[in-house]
Amino acid sequence: MAANKNLLMLPGDGIGPEVCNEVRKVVDWMDKRRAVSFDVKEDLVGGAAFDAHGTPLHDNTLDTAMNCDAVIFGAVGGPQYDKLGWEARPEAGLLALRKEMDLFANLRPAVTFDALLDASTLKPEIVQGLDIMIVRELTAGVYFGEPRGMQTWEGKERCIDTQSYTKDEIVRVAEVAFDLARKRNGKVTSAEKANVMKTGVFWRETVTEVHKNGNEDIELGHMYADNCAMQLVRWPKQFDVIVTDNLFGDILSDCAAMLTGSLGMLPSASLGATDVTGRRKALYEPVHGSAPDIAGEGKANPLAMLLSFAMALRYSFDLGDDADLIEQAAQNLLSQKKRTADISSDGCDILSTGQMGDAVVAELDKLAA
Ligand code: NAD
């Protein structure tokens, strides 16, 4: 059938190409078995783009990213690029994509798989059945606020960063959080430091206003960010969607991720604004990096990448049933003790990256039969 869904695949460096290759297998499977076709373009990013073009993100690549339905991003970076100037660094390619596509909402789910409960440092009863979503504001706040940098003040050297939010920047990310909660368990917790920061008070007031303005079907709670960190390790199942700013989101999402215990299993999505046609710019990537220590060895766990693709199906293509199938396939394989080395335990079959991708496809076949 004709493909009307445009994907841009940016595998990047290290294990990025290896895990993206497994997404191709699922895309092919969907084409054959689900009658869902994608037009997939592939391009370079990060160190690979620097090697080819002298820049981590070529203008043509950015153009394609701006005009596709979803970007599937592997990972960038590697020790060979560590001494490059900031603009040429692989990570600058990813940051430029986020900025140019205005990807202001970063979605980081923390879901525990029963078969991997042992991988968490918390007691099984604390994390069993955990399914929370952190929505982090990604394009404003203290990482971008001006003024920033070194100054001389009263004859002394000092350095400042500025926490700054406009109302629009808070409104749009809060709306994403309420929309998500509506499709999940109907609860949003907003985290800030309204007790000590003016921007925290503004954040709280603005989220409350967005709540009153058409979102009162969702339960809204407010929490100071430090308490939220504590609650995440005390009783994480009290949360459904957490919405927070860039800095607190950075910290809280890593904290939540570790409740699940395994870097090779963590997907993410970054969403931009909806345009007149209803399409959102979006980029999907695993949380892990390029893992140069295992690159090229067939040891990479592709599940974080495949689960990121599942998020693309759910949030960019409204194919929630297909996303469910991929998530279920991953769950089943873990229960059958088919694992890549990073998450293996006693009695497991250790699969290579390619074998795990094949196993996911075989499981999808069974689930869709
Ligand atoms: P990393 O996530 O690449 O690796 C940390 C550890 O986890 C390594 O031991 C690695 O082997 C393991 N690991 C990671 N992903 C795995 C997977 N899918 N399967 C099995 N094991 C996996 O983090 P790092 O070592 O701090 O960084 C390596 C490079 O990646 C650096 O250049 C860093 O800048 C870059 N990085 C890129 C991104 C990104 O592209 N979004 C994110 C983080 C780090």
Image (cartoon, helix red, strand yellow):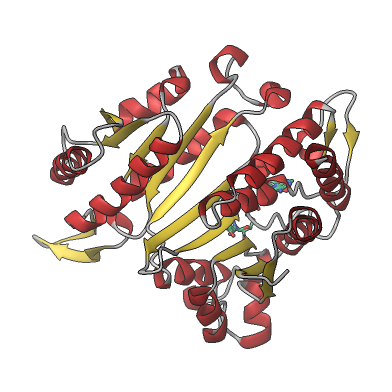
Residue 257 screen position, x and y as percent: 54, 36
- Vertical relation: 132 (above or below) 74: above
231 w.r.t. 362: above or below:
above
Name the quadrant of the N terminus. Answer: bottom right
Looking at this view, name the residue that lies furthest to the front: 1
Residue 286 in view: no
Q: Position of residue 222 (x, y in %)?
A: 25, 30
Point 67% across, 64% down: residue: 79
The residue drawn where x is 54% and y is 52% is: 318
Horizontal arrangement in the rendering, residue 121 relative to residue 157 (left or right):
right
Q: Residue at x 17, y 38 (%)?
A: 212
* Image quadrant in which the C terminus is located: top right
Q: Quadrant of residue 225?
A: top left
Name the residue located 84 percent from the left edge and 38 percent from the top edge.
Answer: 366
Where residue 280 appears, as percent x and y from the top left, is 44, 62
| 163 shown above or below 329 | below
Instruction: Find residue 267 and report its horizontal and vertical position in percent.
Output: 59, 46
Visible residue check, residue 234 = yes
Tell which of 344 and 319 is nearer to you: 319
Residue 279 is left or right of residue 219, and the answer is: right
- Given residues 311 and 141, the one toward you in this image is 311
Residue closest to the eye, 168 or 50: 168
Count of numbered badges drawn on the protein: 0
Residue found at the far left of this picture: 154
